[in-house]
């Protein structure tokens, strides 16, 4: 498993932490970091996400490009299970027919 734990950012947002001790997103404002990241993303029919981590990026992508399809790749089934159980937001994302996990 590549994840070690979940911590809270300065804005009280949960963040996955890798075994190396580094958080996956900004420890200050991960939502803002995701918004900045997506500013230059153009509409595409298909997205591949290398690691799910937290719902910040995929939630914004789904909002911005609702007709696109998304393939989410995680390191292992253990990692995917850990992340899905750690964030309640993924319950709704799992129901979407245009999002695939592996």
Image (tube, rainbow, N blue to C red):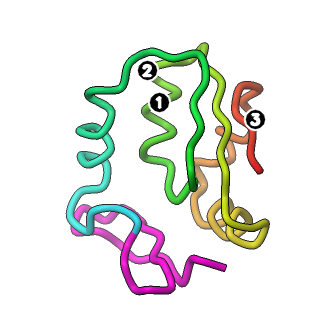
Q: What is the span of residues highlighted in magenta in the rendered image?
A: 1-23
Is the residue 88 above or below the residue 77 in the image? above
Q: Residue at x 67, y 51 (%)?
A: 73
Residue position for label 2: 64
Point out which mark residue 40 bears: none
Q: Position of residue 63 (x, y in %)?
A: 47, 24
Q: Position of residue 80 (x, y in %)?
A: 70, 62
Residue position for label 3: 95
Q: Residue at x 38, y 18 (%)?
A: 42
The answer to whether marks 3 and 2 mark residues whose Cβ atoms lie closer than 8 Å is no
Residue position for label 1: 61
Direction from residue 62 to residue 39 in the image, left or right: left
Q: Where is residue 92 in the image (x, y as percent from the top left)?
A: 66, 39
CA–CA distance in space, label 3 to label 2: 18 Å
Helix, strand or loop under label 3? loop
CA–CA distance in space, label 1 to label 2: 5 Å
Which part of the image, by quadrant, shows the N terminus? bottom right
Q: Residue at x 47, y 70 (%)?
A: 16
Disc 3 crowd rating (10 Å Cα; few below 14, some 14-19, many 20+) is few
Disc 2 crowd rating (10 Å Cα; few below 14, some 14-19, many 20+) is some
């Amino acid at each position: 498993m590549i994840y070690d734990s979940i911590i809270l950012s300065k804005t009280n947002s949960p963040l996955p932490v890798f075994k190396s001790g580094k958080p996956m997103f900004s420890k200050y404002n991960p939502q803002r970091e995701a918004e900045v990241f997506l500013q230059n993303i153009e509409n595409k029919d298909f997205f591949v996400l290398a690691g799910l981590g937290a719902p910040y990026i995929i939630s914004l992508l789904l909002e911005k490009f609702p007709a696109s399809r998304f393939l989410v790749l995680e390191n292992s089934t253990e990692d995917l299970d850990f992340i899905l159980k750690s964030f309640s937001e993924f319950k709704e994302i799992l129901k979407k027919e245009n999002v695939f996990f592996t």
